[in-house]
Amino acid sequence: MKVVKNEGKKETKRTEKMKENGISETRDKSETKGKEPLFEIDPRSVYKCVQCGTCRSVCPVFDVVGWESANTRGRMLIIKSMLEGRPPSEDVLSSLASCTTCGICAVKCPAGANPPEVVEAARAQLVKCGVTTEAQDKLKAAITTSGNSFGETRNRLHWLSDTERSKLPEKSDYVYFVGCFDSYRYPEFAKKTFEVLQRFGVTLLPDEQCCASPLLRTGFRDDAEKIMEHNLEQIRKVGAHTVITGCAGCYTTLKNNYPGELRVISLPEFLAEHLEELNLKRLDLTVTYHDPCHLGRHNKVYDPPREVIQAICTLKEMKNIKENSRCCGGGGGVRIGYPDISLKLAKKRIEDVPEGVDYIVTSCPLCVRNLRDAAEDIEVIDIVELVAMALE
Ligand code: SF4
Ligand code: SF4
């Protein structure tokens, strides 16, 4: 395997050019000098791609950007060339960093390739070589210094009063993992979710930190491991065997990246399982539902949110649903790194909304955020808000 070295004059020029493009090199070159960076991508997962181009028609980023390097096949070709010794460059970075990891290409690929998995592995490889975008560096710094993706210094449970916090059960079989978004951007979702879950004896972690999803999706695997270990310790301390979360990013990470000892349930699954006990009233509303990629396509949680919605009001489906659902554009670090692309994707998703609905309901705070930015005439709400209305 060819060694990827970031040294020499040519390298300095490249570094300058990369900086101009918002791409930085974070690693001290002495760290990698003399060592061969391991290319940890399984070549079989890359060579599975037969370059048929089926995915070109579904990649939402390609749809709005239009460059070959911004579609799945282009990304797979670039990763293949990295395997064959191509050094990291700004082209490589922007191609790989602009994938939302939505997963629709994996669903459609006739060869059984899993491009988002390969993209994540390639991003980790770039991080190892010290090649990252400024947006990725900022995100990593925020998480590793503050324990949350926003760099917030407030207590993560600031949405509870001191008395409420002091009364939290120290031990429980069930714990609610709030996530950074609901903790700091949508504390009203956290409050409503916890109000429902408390009825079932669910508690909170005394010191939850970011689930590590943003670190894993952008390739910072070593940093992710440390924070995951911290959360695991917290969960073990509480003695919980089941973790419930209302964030699709936290859900897929806890379920697929944490050790298998945990039982992880998404909020819609929990709500659907407890519909009878919740005794929800019917509302005279018609809503549509947006499948978050990391809840739907990545984990096949399609029916529970629909069961909850239909227990409350009328559901009118969007144009593309379930495994064909269009990405909101927020995931994979794209909202932070490429806000314009992210917004365009969200606007495209809004085009799928049917006529005559009162709300777009979804089950992920990142989807709420991104779709709210794009939706002009319709309100976007989280499923817990609909449930709260039906409990009033
Ligand atoms: S990832 Fe799959 S669908 Fe896309 S070009 Fe490769 S083989 Fe074809
Ligand atoms: S995961 Fe989504 S954004 Fe990434 S290459 Fe596949 S279709 Fe495109």
Image: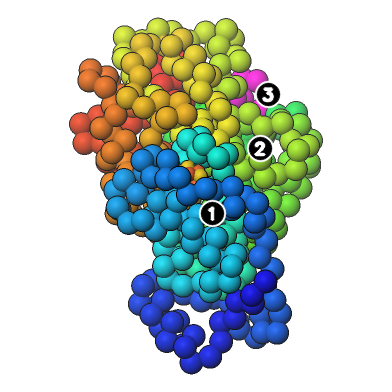
- Is the distance from the Cβ of mark 1 to the nearest ligand 2 atom less than 8 Å? yes
Q: Is mark 3 on a helix, strand or loop?
A: loop
Q: Check if residue 198 falls in the magenta segment.
A: yes
Q: Compared with residue 189, is residue 286 higher up or lower down, i.e. above or below?
A: above
The correct choice, above or below, for 371 with respect to 97 in the image is above
The magenta region covers: 196-202
Q: Nearer the viewer, mark 3 or mark 2?
A: 2
- Residue at 45 percent across and 81 percent down: it is 15
Q: Are marks 2 and 1 in contact (CB under 8 Å)?
A: no
Give how far across and how far down residue 158 sits, in percent.
52, 45
Label of residue 255 in the image: 2
- Dot 3: within a 10 Å radius of its alpha carbon, few (fewer than 14), some, or many (20 or more) residues? some
Whether 220 is drawn above or below 109: the answer is below
The quarter in which the N terminus is drawn is: bottom right
3 and 2 marks in contact (CB < 8 Å): no
Q: Which residue lies furthest to the bottom in this view?
A: 9
Query: Which of the two labelled residues, at mark 2 and mark 1, occupies the earlier sequence position?
Result: 1
For the residue pair 385 and 310, the one nearer the viewer reads as 310
Three-letter amino acid code of the residue under disc 2 = Lys
Q: Residue at x 76, y 31 (%)?
A: 241
SS for callout 2: helix
Crowd band around label 2 with a 10 angstrom C-alpha radius: few (<14), some (14–19), many (20+) = some
What percent of the width, then of the height, locates residue 251?
59, 37
Cα–Cα span, label 2 and label 1: 20 Å
Q: Which residue type does callout 3 highlight?
A: Gly
